[in-house]
Image (cartoon, rainbow, N blue to C red):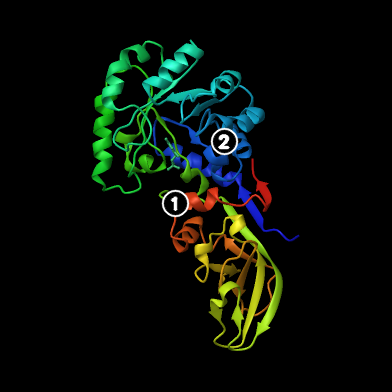
């Protein structure tokens, strides 16, 4: 088989959810936007539902379709983008709960789906989604009279525990919501780790479920192995790949493996990434192509059938660091061409 093999461990996802759930005394939901951070939303939700998760979050209404197909009516599915024009039929048919972001959305929701569930998203300083204090002040009474399921906000700097923004947003959230009789939610993965004053009634972890930072003790949930298609011997001075960016400084053995930027292996990893054969690191040399990588295996004792990009010796965050990005992006870019093997519940 010519494609890379992406191994997805749902038991690890469940173990991560349990570990994050154990850090709080409140309810723990699960964020499964972007196809479950690239791992497959339906499979992830099925495993988490079995483990007891009843509240899922997606970014946009369309992402709820495979989850409802898999799990039926039982879990709550909330939508961070709220109630957008054109979403009404989907929100009604799939019984989704939009997290309302503005007075416009609230008006549209009440007009088109009176009596239908909704939550409220507040902006406590991130300036991205949600109502600001003044807007909320104007309609809070009206909205609260219709029994929202949740009032939530999102932290901008929760992965930096000492950042003053955390306390600032916490204070704003208190000012905007203290005394209301509705469940509240502020923390994603980073917020859970900040401590109990950030937990409120429900947490919304995403990245931690999938093994990423800032959840340092997470269990890794994916492995990625790329098959070796060809191996060749180079004389000193020969070059490799587009633009001839790498030149052999000694007689070298180069493995060409299947996988490239079309599979989400960022081109910035050219001459920067490391792949593993067992526990032996092998340098990626030359440019990342659309479908191929070239790896220096000169120092390996044998010719491998495959090399590992994500696995026991290299986490998604290690790859992210080499690519000058974050684990979230590495996961959500994982390519559609891989041969996906999903294990666990
Ligand atoms: C993505 C997202 C989350 C999950 O964040 P993680 O850092 O992945 O845990 C929670 N809440 C909102 C509003 C989000 O956009």
Q: Quadrant of the N terminus?
A: bottom right
Q: Position of residue 133 (x, y in %)?
A: 27, 26
Given residues 214 and 111, the one toward you in this image is: 111
Which residue is label 2 attached to?
Answer: 48
> Disc 1 beta carbon < 8 A from ligand 1?
no
Question: Mark 1 or mark 2, which has the lower sequence index?
Answer: 2
Q: Is residue 315 above or below residue 100?
A: below
Q: Position of residue 114 (x, y in %)?
A: 48, 10
> Which residue is found at the position 54% from the left and 29% from the top?
61
- Secondary-structure class at tag 1: loop
Given residues 253 and 15, the one toward you in this image is: 253
Q: CA distance from mark 1 to mark 2?
A: 19 Å
> Is residue 140 left or right of 71 when viewed as pictured?
left
> Is residue 197 left or right of 221 when viewed as pictured?
left
Query: Can the viewer see residue 150?
Result: no
- Secondary-structure class at tag 2: helix
> Which residue is found at the position 52% from the left and 38% from the top?
33
**In the rendered picture of this protein, how many numbered marks are placed on residues?**
2
Q: Quadrant of the C terminus?
A: top right
Q: Is residue 8 above or below residue 106?
A: below
Which residue is label 1 attached to?
Answer: 217
Instruction: Give the number of the disc on residue 205.
Output: none
């Amino acid at each position: 088989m010519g494609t890379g093999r992406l191994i997805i461990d749902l038991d690890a996802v469940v173990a991560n959810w349990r570990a994050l759930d154990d850090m709080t005394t409140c309810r723990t939901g699960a964020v499964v936007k972007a196809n479950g951070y690239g791992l497959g939303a339906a499979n992830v939700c099925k495993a988490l539902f079995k483990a007891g998760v009843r509240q899922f979050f997606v970014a946009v209404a369309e992402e709820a379709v495979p989850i409802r197909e898999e799990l039926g009516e039982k879990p709550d599915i909330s939508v961070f983008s709220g109630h957008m024009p054109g979403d009404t039929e989907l929100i009604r048919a799939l019984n989704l709960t939009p997290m309302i972001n503005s007075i416009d959305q609230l008006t549209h929701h009440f007009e088109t789906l009176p009596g239908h569930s909704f939550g409220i998203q507040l902006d406590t300083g991130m300036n991205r989604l949600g109502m600001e204090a003044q807007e909320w002040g104007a309609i809070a009474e009206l909205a609260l009279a219709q029994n929202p399921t949740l009032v939530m906000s999102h932290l901008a700097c929760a992965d930096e525990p000492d950042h003053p923004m955390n306390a600032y947003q916490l204070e704003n959230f208190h000012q905007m919501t203290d005394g209301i009789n509705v469940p509240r939610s502020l923390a994603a993965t980073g917020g859970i780790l900040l401590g109990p004053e950030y937990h409120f009634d429900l947490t919304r972890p995403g990245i931690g479920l999938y093994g990423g930072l800032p959840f340092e003790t997470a269990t890794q949930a994916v492995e990625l192995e790329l098959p070796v298609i060809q191996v060749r011997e180079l004389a000193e001075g020969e070059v490799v790949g587009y633009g001839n960016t790498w030149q052999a400084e000694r007689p070298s053995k180069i493995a060409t493996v299947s996988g490239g930027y079309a599979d989400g292996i960022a081109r910035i990893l050219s001459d920067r990434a490391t792949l593993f054969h067992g526990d032996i690191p092998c340098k990626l040399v030359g440019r990342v192509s659309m479908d191929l990588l070239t790896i220096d295996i000169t120092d390996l004792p044998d010719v491998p059938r495959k090399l590992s990009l994500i696995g026991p010796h290299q986490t998604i965050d290690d790859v992210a660091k080499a690519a000058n990005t974050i684990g979230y992006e590495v996961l959500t870019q994982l390519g559609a061409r891989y041969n996906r093997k999903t294990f666990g519940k």
